[in-house]
Image (cartoon, helix red, strand yellow):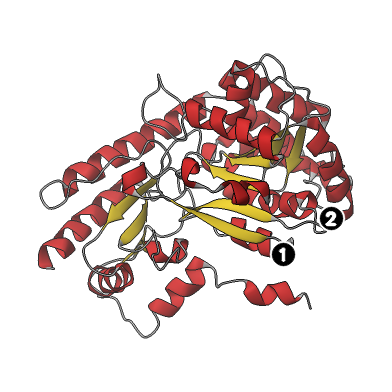
């Protein structure tokens, strides 16, 4: 077997199960999970109908490149959402079986194993970035995100020698777990660095459609490219998904878009990889990308839950609203794993210790002393979780 497999760390939820081993939560409380970022809002009925109506497509082999109608729907959405002058549905967009799979497989296709290769990534992070780097034969290089730097990496602190060996940079905006949005100015700086040092920017924008101010949606990498006249999106790739935007995590539907010079060889890789999206999923996905009303309603529901959760917690803790996304990234004053274990035992609420999402950088894990709260449950459950969390913190 590939020896790089031995370098992979247990996924955060495996570590959480181990942390809770032998713990019996208080039976007077029903379980509430705020640990996994799995949307629990209803999936759109019209998407379900599109899926059912296209069930005859089960008899059809899907193509890796995807249906023209799906790519055109995605192109139209991208142009409207990010104010693009143009994006070519044929050469600059590729449907994928969920962005988790695509983030991993794109890294395998992109890394030149004959060269020394670093993959830069924020820390704490979505763990697929690290695993993708290891299995592509590259080395992860962690960029700490803390309150002091607004939970955005300090790119100015990265040495020139590190940039010189960088083949790929992961940007996660809005960030998981912090919810921080990378600014236009920072994205422009990264594009200039990519040109100077010849690396690819991979922007994971899967939380981009969950934000709290309708007048200020998060900026995207392709949007900044368009603003500076970089209409070929050179060295820039973005990843989007229907999982969070449309509450469709089970559809496993997303897309990759950007530089055609990168999309073309990635399509070749995916053809051999055998990861074509089922035709009925493509038809349902096209319907989802063509509708914004359900996305607006989804944001309104998250806005309600965040405001209520924050208000309930206010007497004991002043939560900081994220820029976007559906996580509270909460600082705690005891070890985060101890906090999570005791909260589960005493209140039957599951949260994720921040250290599980980070790595030691010069002896310090930037995720430590934090917990991630995923406000994905229905409003009444989120409110009940907030009351239990408030009571728990009062007892500490």
In the image, 267 versus 27, the foreground residue is 267
Residue 141 lies left or right of residue 260; in this view the side is: left
| Residue drawn at 67 percent across, 43 percent down | 253
- Residue placed furthest toward the bottom: 22
From the top left corner, tell me how far across and down residue 392 is, in percent: 17, 64
**Quarter occupied by residue 201:** top right
Q: Is residue 56 above or below residue 183?
A: below
Whichever of labels 1 and 2 marks the residue nearer the N terminus, that label is 1
State the separation of the CA atoms marked 1 and 2: 15 Å
Disc 1 crowd, CA 10 A, few/some/many (<14, 14-19, 20+): many
Residue bearing mark 2 = 273
From the image, state whether disc 1 or disc 2 is nearer to you.
Answer: 1
Q: Nearer the viewer, residue 21 or 11?
A: 11
Q: Residue furthest top?
A: 85
**Which secondary structure lies at badge 1?**
helix
Q: Residue at x 35, y 62 (%)?
A: 351
Where residue 227 appears, x then y in whole percent?
59, 17
Asked if residue 302 is positioned above or below residue 222 in the image, the reply reads below
Query: Can you identify the residue that label 1 sits on?
Result: 135
Q: Say whether residue 252 is visible.
A: no
């Amino acid at each position: 077997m590939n020896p790089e497999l031995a370098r992979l760390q247990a996924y955060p939820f495996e570590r959480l199960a181990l942390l809770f081993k032998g713990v019996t939560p208080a039976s007077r409380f029903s379980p509430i999970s705020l640990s996994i970022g799995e949307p629990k809002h209803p999936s759109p009925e019209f998407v379900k109908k599109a899926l059912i109506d296209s069930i005859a497509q089960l008899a059809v082999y899907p193509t890796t490149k995807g249906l023209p109608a799906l790519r055109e729907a995605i192109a139209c959405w991208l142009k409207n959402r990010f104010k693009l002058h143009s994006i070519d549905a044929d050469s600059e967009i590729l449907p994928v079986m969920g962005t988790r799979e695509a983030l991993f497989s794109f890294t395998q296709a992109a890394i030149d194993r004959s060269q020394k290769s670093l993959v830069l990534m924020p820390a704490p992070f979505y763990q697929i970035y690290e695993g993708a780097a290891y299995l592509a034969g590259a080395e992860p290089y962690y960029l700490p995100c803390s309150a002091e730097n607004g939970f955005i990496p300090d790119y100015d602190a990265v040495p020139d020698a590190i940039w010189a060996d960088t083949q790929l940079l992961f940007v996660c905006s809005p960030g998981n777990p912090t919810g921080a949005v990378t600014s236009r100015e920072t994205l422009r700086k990264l594009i200039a660095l990519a040109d100077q040092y010849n690396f690819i920017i991979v922007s994971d924008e899967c939380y981009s459609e969950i934000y709290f101010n309708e007048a200020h949606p998060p900026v995207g990498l392709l949007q900044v490219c368009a603003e500076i006249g970089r209409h070929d999106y050179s060295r820039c790739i973005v990843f989007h998904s229907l999982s969070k935007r449309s509450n469709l995590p089970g559809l496993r539907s997303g897309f990759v878009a950007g530089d055609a010079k990168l999309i073309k060889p990635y399509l070749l890789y995916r053809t051999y990889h055998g990861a074509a999206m089922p035709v009925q999923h493509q038809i349902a996905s096209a319907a989802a990308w063509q509708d914004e009303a359900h996305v607006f309603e989804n944001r309104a529901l998250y806005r309600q839950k965040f405001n209520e959760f924050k208000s309930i917690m206010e007497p004991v803790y002043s939560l900081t609203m994220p820029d976007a996304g559906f996580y509270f990234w909460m600082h705690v004053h005891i070890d985060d794993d101890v906090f999570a274990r005791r909260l589960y035992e005493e209140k039957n609420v599951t949260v994720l210790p921040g250290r599980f999402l980070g790595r030691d950088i010069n002896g310090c894990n930037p995720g430590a002393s934090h917990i991630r709260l995923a406000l994905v449950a229905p409003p009444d459950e989120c409110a009940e979780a907030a009351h239990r969390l408030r009571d728990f913190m009062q007892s500490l």
